[in-house]
């Protein structure tokens, strides 16, 4: 354990600071301590110039040895490494999508009980996008065709990915012009691994163009499928109110946390925990009830659909266990630290893995029975309740901090908020942007990372953007950060927002920072951009919109893939620290400058959030200038005569 750690410099929220202090008192190492021991990072890894693709190496690029044994230079090596990172991200999001799509198909075929299609409207809407016949057909029949379309996009060989057709025509034209229209998701990933094998693709530009092509098969393919299939099965989110941060845990209740990304089991846990027999079982064990909370994006999935409170984001997974009040943490896939069972050893917490492909040493494995999902979820909850008796009350300390949040902003819900049931559309938002009451829309997405003070970048950036009339949409761990910082309520608008944004938020009754879901749900942002273009008045491609993406505390390979598909779609992306590409000068230049001419957007690495806000606003202004709408908004009170002329 590092001695010198100043806890208030490690996290921006009081609950995390309190738990870091408790971890120290309990002699437990967390990722913050381990980071301190790893602080001197390998220069070649940081710069992307270490190659271990073949066994003539590993090779490292230096001034004295500018080429690897095979002759590969720094740009080739950095580009290959970068493409492999993008592949990791695309594969993870897309495999998540595949699992939900397979579940949808099995349900449509009547093979799974306990699950049902909760959003028939979404089945019809999505079938319409694919051109699937719906007239006079049974819901399950249509759903099966939709699931087949989803699954077909993983394996299509020569034809373009069908979900690409959901993008605006002009955006698709750009992809076609640059030869990056993706085929099947699986092929895109396999091809990336082939191209980066020793002795195949050596041209850094060619490699990077495949990174963009493959990332499109994530953003417009795998992730989009994950979101669509989840909306069909678990419901398209509606606005709802709940709470976030470790203070949602209860001393009197059995506390269960769900952590990871896939909602299949956690959604059933959220249902099972409300069943009378489970509540009785908890009472018989001496508890008042059961609290289910979430960590990371599984949390976002069940928050959006059930209002289940969130205990914390990525860097709080260990700190949640340090409360000493968790009976069970149920983990699925992605962003789960292998350290969890080691931290849990100090308390009574059971770590339970539920996915055969994702096992952790020291965690129990529970074979979730999707065929009898509800009963299976109950069995797991009962095992957590049985563990309540083992809680050491003297070891429990639950922070008080928690904040109210309004979440659940799917595209459908945003349109409803803007126009009500009968006039649901993006028209009011487009008008507000055209009138410069709202300067633009910024999507803040992704993780947190112990290299930085947890969530600080996100929190400072959000405040600065909202103050400058920028509507913020968020997903993933950044959305949780804003929730903890009290920014996900309509009242935030009153306190922080600039005049124009405040006016819109007050009229509509929505927060100036909208929680749109988990990290696969970045595709909701792409869908919103598409609908804003279709609504009219803001150009004919996503590249023309005053919209920007931000990934403040990049941690995962998924964030690298996300950054690529946003840029290829024409949305500039700001990232809080550079990718592992700085050792390849041409790679760096290509990604941060040259893509502008191709896609109308590029990557920006900016380490200071206020500086990032200034640069983001400059990008929004530039796009507004091009649209001819960059005029100052002034509130004007009209007299009767002027009103009649407007009518
Ligand atoms: Fe070295 Fe080339 Fe092999 Fe990479 S592919 S390890 S640069 S010899
Ligand atoms: S969980 S990928 S830390 S957002 Fe999606 Fe959070 Fe990033 Fe994992």
Image: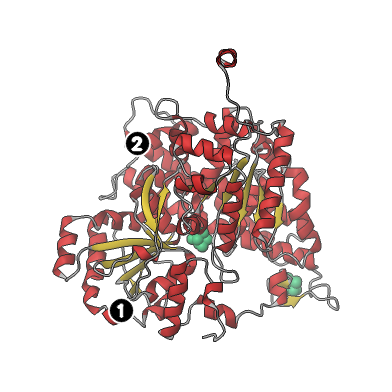
Residue 320 appears at what percent x and percent y?
A: 39, 70
Q: Residue, x 65% and y 52% (percent of image)?
A: 564
Residue 389 located left or right of residue 246: left
Task: Give the residue at mark 1.
Answer: 348
Q: Residue furthest right?
A: 64
In terms of image quadrants, where is residue 55?
bottom right
Using the image, tell me which numbered label, if any, was put on residue 241.
none
Q: Visible in this render: residue 474?
A: yes
Q: Is residue 613 above or below residue 354?
A: above
Q: Visible in this render: residue 214?
A: no
Q: Residues within 10 Å of mark 2 (few under 14, many from 20)?
A: some
Residue 136 located left or right of residue 41: left
Residue 337 appears at what percent x and percent y?
A: 47, 72
Residue 117 appears at what percent x and percent y?
A: 32, 42
Camera-nearest residue between 526 and 48: 526
Which quadrant contains ligand 1?
bottom right
Task: Give the residue at mark 2.
Answer: 120
């Amino acid at each position: 354990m590092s001695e010198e750690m100043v806890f208030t410099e490690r996290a921006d929220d009081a609950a995390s600071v309190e738990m870091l202090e408790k971890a120290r008192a309990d002699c437990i190492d967390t990722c913050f301590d381990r980071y301190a021991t790893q602080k001197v990072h390998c220069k070649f890894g940081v710069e992307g110039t270490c190659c271990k693709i073949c066994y003539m190496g590993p090779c490292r690029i230096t001034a004295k040895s500018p080429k690897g044994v095979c002759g590969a230079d720094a740009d080739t090596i950095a580009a290959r490494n970068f493409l492999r990172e993008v592949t990791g991200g695309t594969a993870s999001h897309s495999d998540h999508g595949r699992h939900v799509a397979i579940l949808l198909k099995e349900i449509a075929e009547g093979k799974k009980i306990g699950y049902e299609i909760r959003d028939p409207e979404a089945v019809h809407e999505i079938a319409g996008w694919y051109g699937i016949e719906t007239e006079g057909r049974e819901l399950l029949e249509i759903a099966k065709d939709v699931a087949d379309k989803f699954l077909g996009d993983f394996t299509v060989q020569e034809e373009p990915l069908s979900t690409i057709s959901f993008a605006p025509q002009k955006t698709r034209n750009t992809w076609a012009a640059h030869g990056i229209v993706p085929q099947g998701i699986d092929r895109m990933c396999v091809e990336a691994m082939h191209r980066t094998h020793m002795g195949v693709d050596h041209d850094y530009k060619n490699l990077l163009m495949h990174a963009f092509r493959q990332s499109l098969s994530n953003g417009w393919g795998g992730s989009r499928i994950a979101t669509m299939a989840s909306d069909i099965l678990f419901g398209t989110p509606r606005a709802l109110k709940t709470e976030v941060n470790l203070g949602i845990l209860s001393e009197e209740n059995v506390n269960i946390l769900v952590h990871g990304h896939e909602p299949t089991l956690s959604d059933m846990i959220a249902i099972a925990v409300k069943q009378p027999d489970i509540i009785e079982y908890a009472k018989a064990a001496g508890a008042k009830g059961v609290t289910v909370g979430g960590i990371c994006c599984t949390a976002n999935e069940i928050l959006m659909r059930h209002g289940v409170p969130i205990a914390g984001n990525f860097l709080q997974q260990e700190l949640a266990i340090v409360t000493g009040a968790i009976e069970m943490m149920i983990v699925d896939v992605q962003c789960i630290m292998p350290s969890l069972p080691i931290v849990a050893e100090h308390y009574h917490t059971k770590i339970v893995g539920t996915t055969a492909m994702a096992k952790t040493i020291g965690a129990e494995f529970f074979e979730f029975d999707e065929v009898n999902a509800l009963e299976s979820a109950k069995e797991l909850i009962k095992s957590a309740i049985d563990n309540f008796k083992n809680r050491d009350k003297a070891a429990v300390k639950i922070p008080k901090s928690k904040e109210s949040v309004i979440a659940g902003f799917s595209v459908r819900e945003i349109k409803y908020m803007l126009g009500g049931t009968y006039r649901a559309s993006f028209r009011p938002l487009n008008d507000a942007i055209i009138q410069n009451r709202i300067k633009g829309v910024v999507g803040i997405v992704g993780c947190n990372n112990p290299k930085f003070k947890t969530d600080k970048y996100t929190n400072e950036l959000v405040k600065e953007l909202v103050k400058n009339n920028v509507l913020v949409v968020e997903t993933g761990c950044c959305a949780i950060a804003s929730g903890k910082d009290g920014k996900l309520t309509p009242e935030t608008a009153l306190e922080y927002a600039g005049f124009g944004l405040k006016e819109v938020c007050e009229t509509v009754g929505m927060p100036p920072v909208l929680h749109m879901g988990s990290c696969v749900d970045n595709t909701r942002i792409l869908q919103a951009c598409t609908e804003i273009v279709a609504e009219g008045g803001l150009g004919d491609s996503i590249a023309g919109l005053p919209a920007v993406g931000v990934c403040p505390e990049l941690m995962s390979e998924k964030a690298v893939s996300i950054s690529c598909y946003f840029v290829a779609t024409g949305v500039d992306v700001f990232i809080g620290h550079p990718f592992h590409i700085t050792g390849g000068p041409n790679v760096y230049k290509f990604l941060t400058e040259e893509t502008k001419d191709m896609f109308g957007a590029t990557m920006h690495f900016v380490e200071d959030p206020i500086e990032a806000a200034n640069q983001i606003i400059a990008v929004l202004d530039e796009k507004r200038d091009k649209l001819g709408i960059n005029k100052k908004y002034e509130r004007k009170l009209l007299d009767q005569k002027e009103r009649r002329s407007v009518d």
